[in-house]
Amino acid sequence: MNNILLVNFLFAGFLVNCNQKNVDTARDDASTQPNIIFVLTDDHRFDAMGFMDHPFLETPNMDRMAKEGIHFSRALVTTSLCSPSRASILSGMYAHNHGVVNNYNPVDTTLKFFPEYLQESGYNTAFIGKWHMGGEIDDPQKGFDYWLSFKGQGSYWADGHGTSRVVPQTSMDGYNINGKRVPQKGYITDELTDFAIQWLNGNTDKRPFMLYLSHKAVHSDFVAADRHLGRYKSNHLKIPETYTQEKGKPMWLTNQRNSRHGSDFGYNLPDFDLNKYYRRYCESLLAVDENLGRVMDWAEKSNQADNTIVIYMGDNGFQFGEHGLIDKRTAYEASIKVPLLIWKPGHVEKSRVINEAVANIDIAPTILDLAGIATAGNMDGRSFKPLLDGEKVAWRKELLYEYYWERNYPYTPTTHAIWMNFMICRMTRKNPEI
Ligand SMILES: [Ca+2]
């Protein structure tokens, strides 16, 4: 048996085990559907992980997921903006279909997200963390048995310390836990994970569970946990090759670098320092990784380890100087490419990498497929479970990218682009040939 066949066999075993009855758990008479822990990070770009040959960032737990699990090298988002991408993850739909086209649009109440399908099929579902759809709403949403969220962007700390600018939709109103207001006490990445583990430990339900842990980190304005402040004070951002931009670009594109989302005048701050900003990003990611480790540790030690899958993903990327830009929204690689890792305790996958282009719109159909539930007909995405199973299936060669102009951030125009394997054809209102 060659190595490829061996690896495929191992993962096939992974999924077979997911469907086996777990005899020593509280749910031994329950469904054979797997437990799913989905951890979503905010604005985590694809290469900000140690195993991606990062020059200094330490992410031992993400590295472990990649080493023992599956890493998608080409995971993309169809809109590089918080709310639209989150709605795509939950609905399996493009933004033009789910309608959450910016960070303020409310969610159409007729939309059905994948947790609701899971709940209907017998899952115990929990949402913990950043919802951020419909502006300032943090009310419990349908499809979840347990709910913990905060308004808008929340805050890294209850008193907002550590920030260098005012972030729109910041909230220091604490948490909404099943409809009851509870004050924030600690650093948000730690605290959300505390709540998640508390929920996992207290879960005696016989139903399979799906936990959706949705971090605020590492959304700008980045604030690291106190224990990580200054860890990378001697390290430097490697300036990207496209930093100075290519000649011959239209003036509006060149002028973006002097805008709020440009590397020369970031967030309109007179003292904006791209290097320091990147260090803060990396230091803030340290707590994300540590807390991911706590979740993995729980999964490994729990008596449900054989039947639990952990998925880690970012909701969109982030530019640090690429094309003279910071932040996101564009169809450039740093903006649309995200981490996607899948790991199952006790099932070592020997660093398997899947290179097919998968996207945020594929998460809902894939999770439903893992749970043995048919994909809803209105979903644009496709289950990548066959890729996990090692099946040779024809996969997509193109993907639509869309971003809708925001009145409060006018420097990035409405953008539609087609991702085609290794190239991106970008079409804007002014420059269809770019
Ligand atoms: Ca985001």
Image (spheres, grey):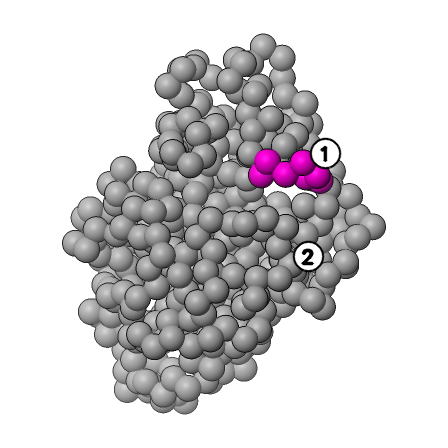
The amino acid type, in three-letter code, at marker 1 is: Ile
Which is more N-terminal, label 1 or label 2?
Answer: 1
Question: Nearest the camera: 123 or 172?
Answer: 172
- The percent position of residue 416, horizontal first and vertical second, equals 37, 27
Q: Mark 2 CB in 8 Å range of ligand 1?
A: no
Question: Nearest the camera: 121 or 318?
Answer: 318
Q: Which residue is mark 2?
A: 283
- The percent position of residue 407, horizontal first and vertical second, equals 38, 34
Q: Quadrant of residue 393?
A: top left
Residue 245 seen in render: yes
Q: Is residue 32 left or right of residue 335?
A: left
- The percent position of residue 189, horizontal first and vertical second, equals 55, 66
Residue 269 lies within the magenta run: yes
For the record, the magenta segment spans: 267-273
Q: Is residue 99 left or right of residue 399?
A: left
The amino acid type, in three-letter code, at marker 2 is: Glu
Q: Is residue 228 left or right of residue 369?
A: right
Q: Residue at x 68, y 57 (%)?
A: 283
- Secondary structure at numbered mark 1: loop
Residue 201 lies within the magenta run: no
Q: Residue at x 54, y 50 (%)?
A: 166
Q: Residue at x 53, y 20 (%)?
A: 253
Q: Which residue is mark 1?
A: 239
Using the numbered discs, state the Cα–Cα distance from disc 2 to disc 1 in whole angstroms.
18 Å
Residue 39 seen in render: no
Q: Residue at x 72, y 46 (%)?
A: 276
